[in-house]
Amino acid sequence: MEPEAFRAAAHAVVDLMADYLAGVESYPVLPPIEPGSLAPQFPSSAPEDGEPIEAILADYRRLIEPNATHWQHPGFLAYFGTTASGPGILGEMLTAALGQNPMLWRTSPIGTELEQVVVDWLRQGVGLPEGWDGLLTDTASTSSLIALAGARQTAGIDAASEGLSGRDAVPGLRVYASEEAHSSIEKACMTLGLGRSSLVRVPTDDAYAMRTDALTAAIERDRAAGRQPIAIVVTVGTTSSTAIDPVAAVADVAERERVWLHVDSAYAGAVALIPERRAPFAGWERADSIVINPHKWLFTPLDASLLLTRRMPVLREAFSLVPEYLRTLDRETPVRDYNEYTPQLGRRFRALKLWMQLRWFGLEGLRQRIERHLEMAHTFTGWLDADPAWERLAPVPFSTVCFRWVGDRTLDDAVLDERNAAIMDRVNRTGEVFLSHTRLGGRFTIRLAIGNLRTEERHVARAWELLREAAHAG
Ligand SMILES: Cc1ncc(COP(=O)(O)O)c(C=O)c1O
């Protein structure tokens, strides 16, 4: 693409983007289409001859944009929201144009050093002391995988070079996380060769938080059976109900047992930007690693996950492998080559969008937006608690509310499960809002999660109205 053709096409694309963002609310959040209906609308093989950009963009308007699930929509109240903010999108555009690969300092000096800068800005922003370092990855799943690889490396069996298979002297390694911990922890155990059976799911209390007594008992049992605990994962803001594990009490256990402590605050970690709201995180500075996802509640376009750690050298032991073709021959002083800390070699220049966003919003701008979301969740909780036909199923420490319709409270759980699934489906079919669900205590639970930059109280009020209408409709 010649520079002038690129310029004209890029302007057209920016117009498309701005129009989309300005009008996103006119789309149904969920496209009203059936699975399998899209692929047949595309040619079954790639064109032999190139096509003009106008034709491609016309098809983008016709086939791509309307068939997206609109995460940018203010009525997106499902899962955990992830908004691609304006400055974040601009950062992505420049990232694509610069085409950096900060795998080595040499292959992207600015990609490498800006990553160090924004990691440190965020470290300070969430109130962690000096001595914490870190890196950016694609997702919390990868961040937790890297953290648990670090934990495995500290087990004294050099799994990075010797592996785990066929080694009689290696005891059963164990990782502890609550019953409510995210599936990414279990996947990390699968991927690291520990196996799903290495993950001990610790029971939770009435608020879905890890029970420290149960954790201690599980570790004792495992030690007595000759197994080796290597890591404990606490979650601040679980995926289902945003429960808060007792970080400080678990940190005591981790220190006593000399095991790696990893804090999964992929969603809620953003709240630590607000100094007055740091109570749920107290003690996390004693952990070995922490994950926070800017692509959840810090309005960064997917993907951006922040892995903070006090143990960078251990991560390097777990992942460093420098073949000849990656050596930088003329280098005297050691520099940070990020690929030595991660499973993959090539890396995206994620720091640019974060740098642009942090400057554009300022920490205070981010805090204000998060506060607004917390307030809206509080307001919705008030409406819910005041209506006897509805039942709240978990505390609301952040911006996610878990609840179900119970009517006159005469129906049994099996019927309520069906009715609530139908209510949620009816609400989602309106296209005005999108809610998702989970199960808490075995019960079908509707979740309303506020995290989208465009969500205002009127959208939350509309969700409440739609829920009550759907319940009345039977
Ligand atoms: C607590 C928690 N941890 C980890 C994840 C996984 O995040 P990712 O999609 O970035 O891997 C999620 C996703 O919602 C989460 O809620």
Image: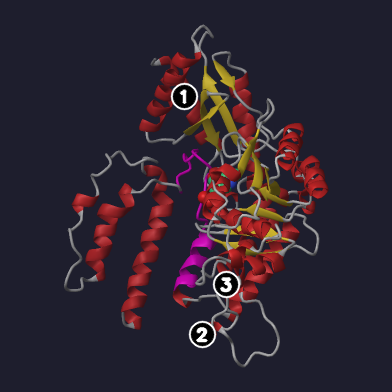
Position of 203 with respect to 57 (left or right) is right
Q: Which residue is mark 3?
A: 339
Q: Which residue is mark 1?
A: 467
User: Mark 1 or mark 2, which is nearer the start of the sequence?
Assistant: 2
Say which element carries label 2: helix
118, 359: nearer the viewer? 118
Quadrant of residue 103 in the image?
bottom right
Q: CA distance from mark 3 to mark 1?
A: 48 Å
- Residue ID at (61%, 54%): 168
Which region shows up in magenta? Answer: 72-96
Marks 2,1: beta carbons within 8 A: no
- Residue ID at (61%, 40%): 181
Say which element carries label 3: helix
Task: Tell me the crowding category of disc 3: few under 14, some 14 to 19, or many 20 or more residues within 10 angstroms, Cα based.
Answer: many
What type is the residue that disc 1 sits on? Leu
Position of 425 with respect to 140 (left or right) is left
Please say whether residue 86 is one of the residues in the magenta stretch.
yes
What type is the residue that disc 2 sits on? Tyr
